[in-house]
């Protein structure tokens, strides 16, 4: 009786395919900053890419449908006085994005659904608290308006973006530069990696390290860590001989790894992108021309190699689409946005299926855009799992919502009366002001057109007279 040697898995035949040339985004000057972030962030509405910009830092935001050649004068998001190092879309509002910069600030931006006429230069709010450059951003997965930042000052700050306040500051846990920070699924714990080669599990609200492991990977190059669905920690790093390595760890027993595999001798830092719905982790190395993917299961060897997507050009960075932005009718389980030197190319990961019906096993309910908690509730100690949505009918984005920043007056102990009325009044006055501005612009444009018409008529008359004179 022959023994089955092929492992059964519905993801065994996942294959990657680059989108057609007309589906790429051309003529984008991708940033050349030497920083190990993905340089790209994507959600179901927009694609954001950090770009080269003179006199400061900038990134470009394109609607997903705006493929093809990008106009060199396309409006940018500019406001930082030094290069932008990281960007991250808010998971609870597809029009809100945060950017971190070498100028020590974090800025939060509201991106309009329409294409702006000129550069966006005014953020909703600027967060200042770091003393050195800010290189890592991560929104809380379940609490509204909670944003984490990590800087070159070895400090992690957790902000309430809605009020601009610092909720928590973790400033004595990392003796050296922080390489990566990741929330677990409900946002109760953080996994961090640091230049001191230590992997830490932190409870941010208690301000203490719950567990730590020194030299999870023995090499000196940067290490990355992400939480898995089972609560394990998946890490990428380097061996003492500078070989790239991946590991799986149980935070309850950090002495021995659950799995440890050597990969290759390339020197690019591996960026792990983890999909909790399928428990597949995709490894994209900076400077590599391939994406390797592995399935994490409860069976030995626990991290199972699936396949490799290879292409000719090396990648400068990579964006990872949330599950609700995928095309479920084509059995698409992941989509990457690969940055080249001058363009961005979508790469689609698909499970081949013959049926046209919705594939329940590929698309379990996935985190949606509704937050499960408010910032104050999370800070007080509450935890909640993400609010899940079904992708059966394809994801329909919610109506546009604006992020409101409230400035608190510490001298005003009593709550202001009738906030809704005053808010609506201010909105009305703002919309009235916008309407008046638009009407003035239309009037000026009309006058200019009329003047040009009169000038053209006069020139035509002169031309007629000249022609008659020569006859």
Image (cartoon, grey):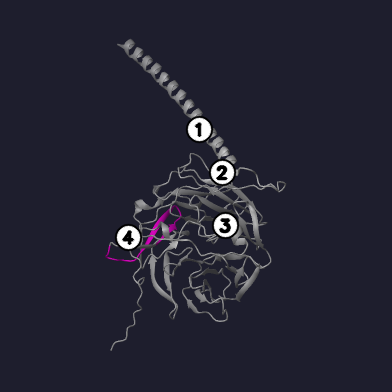
State the image quarter where residue 419 is shown.
Answer: top right
| Of the image marks 2 and 4, the number of the one nearer the N terminus | 2
What's the CA distance linking mark 2 and mark 4?
A: 39 Å
**Residue at the spot x=32%, y=11% of the render?**
468
Q: Earlier in the sequence, mark 1 or mark 2?
A: 2
Residue carrying label 1: 435
Residue 121's tag is: 2
- Secondary structure under the numbered disc 3 in the rendered image: loop
Position of residue 21 measured from the top left corner of the image (x, y, whole percent): 35, 53
Q: Nearer the viewer, residue 115 or 309?
A: 115
Q: Main secondary structure of the magenta part?
A: strand
Answer few, some or many: residues within 10 Å of disc 4's Cα (few below 14, many 20 plus, some between 14 and 19): some
- From the image, tell me which residue sits under label 3: 374
- Callouts 3 and 1 close, C-beta under 8 Å: no
N-terminal-most mark, 2 or 3: 2
User: Judging from the image, what secondary structure is the residue with disc 2 in?
Assistant: loop
Of residues 390 and 24, the one nearer the viewer is: 390
- The nearer-to-camera label among 4 and 3 is 3
> Which numbered disc covers residue 192?
none
Q: Which quadrant of the structure image shows residue 205?
A: bottom right
Q: The C terminus is located in which quarter?
A: top left
């Amino acid at each position: 009786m022959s023994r089955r040697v092929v492992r059964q898995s519905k993801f065994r035949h996942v294959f990657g395919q680059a989108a057609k040339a007309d589906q790429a985004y051309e003529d984008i000057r991708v940033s050349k900053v030497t920083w190990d972030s993905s340089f790209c962030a994507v959600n179901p509405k927009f694609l954001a890419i950090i770009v080269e910009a003179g006199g400061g830092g900038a990134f470009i935001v394109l609607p997903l449908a705006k493929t093809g050649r990008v106009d060199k004068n396309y409006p940018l998001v500019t406001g930082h006085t030094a290069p932008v190092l990281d960007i991250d879309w808010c998971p609870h509002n597809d029009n809100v994005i945060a950017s971190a910069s070498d100028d020590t600030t974090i800025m939060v931006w509201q991106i309009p659904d329409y294409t702006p006429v000129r550069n966006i230069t005014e953020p909703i709010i600027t967060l200042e608290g770091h003393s050195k450059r800010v290189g890592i951003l991560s929104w809380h997965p379940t609490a509204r308006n909670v944003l984490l930042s990590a800087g070159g000052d070895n400090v992690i700050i957790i902000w309430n973006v809605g009020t601009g306040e610092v909720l928590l500051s973790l400033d004595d846990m990392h003796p050296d530069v922080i390489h990566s920070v990741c929330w677990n699924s409900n946002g109760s714990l953080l996994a961090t990696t640091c230049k001191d080669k230590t992997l830490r599990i932190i409870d941010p609200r208690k301000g203490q390290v719950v567990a730590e492991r020194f030299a999870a990977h023995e090499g000196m190059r940067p290490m990355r860590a992400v939480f898995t669905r089972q609560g394990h920690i998946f890490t990428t790093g380097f061996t003492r001989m500078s070989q790239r390595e991946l590991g799986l760890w149980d935070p309850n027993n950090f002495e021995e790894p659950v799995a440890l595999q050597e990969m290759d001798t390339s020197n690019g830092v591996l960026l792990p992108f983890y999909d909790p719905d399928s428990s597949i982790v995709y490894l994209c190395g900076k400077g590599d021309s391939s994406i390797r993917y592995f399935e994490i299961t409860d069976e030995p060897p626990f991290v199972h190699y699936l396949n490799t997507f290879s292409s000719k050009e090396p990648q400068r960075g990579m964006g990872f689409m949330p599950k609700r932005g995928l095309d479920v009718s084509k059995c698409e389980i992941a989509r990457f946005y690969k940055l080249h030197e001058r363009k961005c190319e979508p790469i689609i990961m698909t499970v081949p299926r013959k049926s046209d019906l919705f594939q329940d096993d590929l698309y379990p309910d996935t985190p949606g855009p509704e937050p499960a908690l408010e910032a104050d509730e999370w800070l007080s100690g509450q935890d909640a799992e993400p609010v899940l949505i079904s992708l059966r009918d394809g994801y329909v984005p919610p109506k546009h919502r604006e992020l409101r920043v409230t400035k608190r007056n510490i001298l005003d102990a009593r709550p202001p009366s009738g906030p809704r009325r005053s808010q609506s009044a201010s909105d009305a006055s703002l919309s009235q002001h916008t309407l008046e501005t638009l009407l003035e612009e239309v009037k000026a444009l009309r006058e200019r057109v009329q003047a040009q018409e009169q000038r053209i008529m006069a020139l035509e008359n002169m031309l007629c007279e000249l022609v008659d004179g020569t006859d």
